[in-house]
Amino acid sequence: EAQVTQNPRYLITVTGKKLTVTCSQNMNHEYMSWYRQDPGLGLRQIYYSMNVEVTDKGDVPEGYKVSRKEKRNFPLILESPSPNQTSLYFCASSFGVRTGELFFGEGSRLTVL
Amino acid sequence: RKEVEQDPGPFNVPEGATVAFNCTYSNSASQSFFWYRQDCRKEPKLLMSVYSSGNEDGRFTAQLNRASQYISLLIRDSKLSDSATYLCVVYQGGKLIFGQGTELSVKP
C-alpha cells in the first residue's frame, strides 16, 4: 500500500530534550516536505527536499533540522525543543510539487512542556 | 496580507444544502490551484484541482477567477460525510501555499 509513515504519532516531551520525528514513503517520490499546523495559522512549511542530499528552508525553519540521506526517508529533528514548537506535524511527499498532489502522513502531535 | 485567505467558518448547513467557499490569493503570478479536504485530526487529502475553465467532480464544482484572484468550491446536495475542513492551495514560485481552511459542518 502506497503511504507516508510518520513516527511517533504522539509525543509529550520537555524543553531542551532532543527528539526526532521520522518520515518514510514507499512511493519513490523525489519531493518531501515537513509542515506544522496550528489553529488559525493553517499549514506552514518547515523544510522541504527536492531530492536526496538536497534540502531547503520553508517558511518556519527556526529550531528545526532535516536530512535526506535516502530517497525514502526525511526525518525532522528538534535539537532543543521549546513550548512554541508544540504543534501537529505532517510529513508529505510528491512526484513533483507542481502537480499539487501531496501525499501526507497521518501526523505527529507533539507537546513540549 | 496573507498569501492565501479563506473564511475560517464554521459553515453550519443542513443536509441537502448547497454551500460555497471562496478563497483569495495575493500573488497574480500564482500558477495552479487546488482544493484539499481535511477531516478532523486527520491528514489533508487532495480533493480536486481547479482549472481555468472551471471543473466539476460529482457534487463538487471548482472555479477560478484570475482577474479577481479568487477560487471557489461549490458543494451541492451536502451530505453528512462532507463535514470537514476545506483547504485552498495555491502553487506559486515552486511552492504550495495553504490557506488556513474553511470548516464545514453538515447537520441532519
Image (cartoon, rainbow, N blue to C red):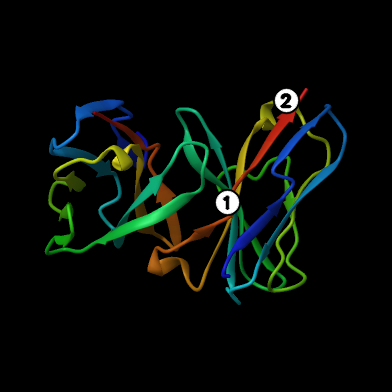
The chain under label 2 reads: A
Q: Is residue B93 above or below residue A77?
A: below
Q: Is residue B71 above or below residue B8?
A: below
Residue drawn at the location 19% of the way across and 34% of the way down: B15
Asked if residue B20 lies left or right of residue B81, the reply is left
Circle 1 residue: A58
Q: Earlier in the sequence, mark 2 or mark 1?
A: 1
Secondary structure category for the residue under label 2: helix
Q: Is residue A84 above or below residue B93?
A: above
Q: Are marks 2 and 1 in contact (CB under 8 Å)?
A: no
Circle 2 residue: A83
Which quarter of the picture shows residue A99?
bottom left
- Furthest residue to the top? A113
The chain under label 1 reads: A
* Circle 1: residue type: Gly
Q: Is residue B93 above or below residue B105?
A: below
The answer, for residue A14, to whether it is visible in the render is yes
Disc sitting over residue B68 in the figure: none
- Furthest residue to the bottom? A28
Asked if residue A43 lies left or right of residue A23, the reply is left
In which quadrant will I find the N terminus of chain A?
bottom right
Residue drawn at the location 79% of the way across and 34% of the way down: A81
Secondary structure category for the residue under label 1: loop
The answer, for residue B30, to whether it is visible in the render is no
Within 10 Å of the Cα at label 1, are there few (<14), some (14-19), or many (20+) other Cα atoms? some
Both labels 2 and 1 in a single chain? yes
Q: Residue A111's spot in the image, x, y percent?
A: 72, 29
Q: Residue B7's spot in the image, x, y percent?
A: 28, 31
Asked if residue A36 lies left or right of residue B23, the reply is right
Which quarter of the picture shows residue A48?
bottom right
Within 10 Å of the Cα at label 2, are there few (<14), some (14-19), or many (20+) other Cα atoms? some
